[in-house]
Amino acid sequence: LSPPQRLEGDGRVQRVVLSGGEVVDCDFAIAAVGAVPNKDLLHGTPIAAGRAILADAYCRTNVPGIYAAGDCAAVFDPLFGKHRMLDHWDNAIVTGKLAGRNMAGMSEPYSAVNYFFSDVFELSLSAWGDSRHIDRRLLRGTPNVDSPDFIEFGVGAEGRIVQVLVVGHSGEDETLRDLVGKRVKVNGNEEALKDPKSDLKGLL
Ligand SMILES: Cc1cc2nc3c(=O)[nH]c(=O)nc-3n(C[C@H](O)[C@H](O)[C@H](O)COP(=O)(O)OP(=O)(O)OC[C@H]3O[C@@H](n4cnc5c(N)ncnc54)[C@H](O)[C@@H]3O)c2cc1C
């Protein structure tokens, strides 16, 4: 599908017209526009930033004694080997606590598997990992519209799980997090991952 060009409707949104001319009927539209950190506070300071304030795995900026955490920071994530701007609740809690502990004298690196959760009406959504590394996707469960209950495994080019996305499903959070945290290799286990009856713990 081509990118959306405009919304149309009779007093309320009823369809999305795409730039290629296709028309998609809908009942409502959700704009997922992302977030842009306000960096005004940094003007005139030597604190290094890209899209967000750059912090190492200890939440330290390039200026001694100044730490950054939460939405305004891109903390170095050793699991994915890069600075990551993760504008989610769990990341704000994890990096906020970590920065606080390190400011108070600890020396702890970031060791979490990043986690996102949200609810859209009665639909729950959770995710661990990084979608930018996904080469192919494996589906486990039912993605039907009425009662979705499925897990999608994002597999990187090197054959390891790099992201897990969960919709309408609960009860396996620790295992799913560890499948990403351990970058489990899927080669040969594709059918087990796709079969909702198979035990995921066995793959760890
Ligand atoms: C509409 C919306 C929906 C969201 N839904 C989800 C979701 O479903 N799941 C999820 O995981 N995340 C969600 N998020 C993201 C989540 O809210 C943020 O990631 C999280 O709140 C970040 O926490 P934070 O403490 O880093 O920043 P914030 O919560 O933004 O807190 C920063 C605080 O600093 C204050 N401040 C700013 N500048 C200054 C200054 N110069 N001096 C003093 N104080 C200052 C601000 O007023 C604010 O109170 C959503 C965000 C929005 C906007």
Image (cartoon, grey):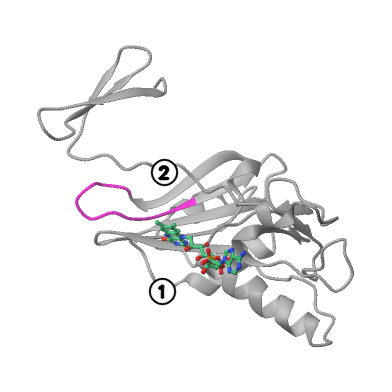
The amino acid pointed to by label 2 is Ala
Q: CA distance from mark 1 to mark 2?
A: 27 Å
Task: Tell which tag, 1 or 2, sits nearer the viewer.
Answer: 2
* Image-based side of 63 in relation to 15, left or right: right
- The residue tagged 1 is 171
Badge 2 density bin: few <14, some 14–19, many ≥20, Cα 10 Å: few
- The residue tagged 2 is 32
From the top left corner, tell me how far across and down residue 72 is, in percent: 64, 59
Check whether the beta carbons of the residues at disc 1 and disc 2 lie within 8 A of each other.
no
Magenta stretch containing residue 144, yes or no? yes
Q: Dividing the image into 4 quarters, which one contains the N terminus?
A: top left
Q: Is residue 132 above or below residue 109?
A: above
From the top left corner, tell me how far across and down residue 50 is, in percent: 74, 46
Q: Is residue 128 above or below residue 31?
A: below
Magenta range is 143-152
Q: Dividing the image into 4 quarters, which one contains the C terminus?
A: bottom right
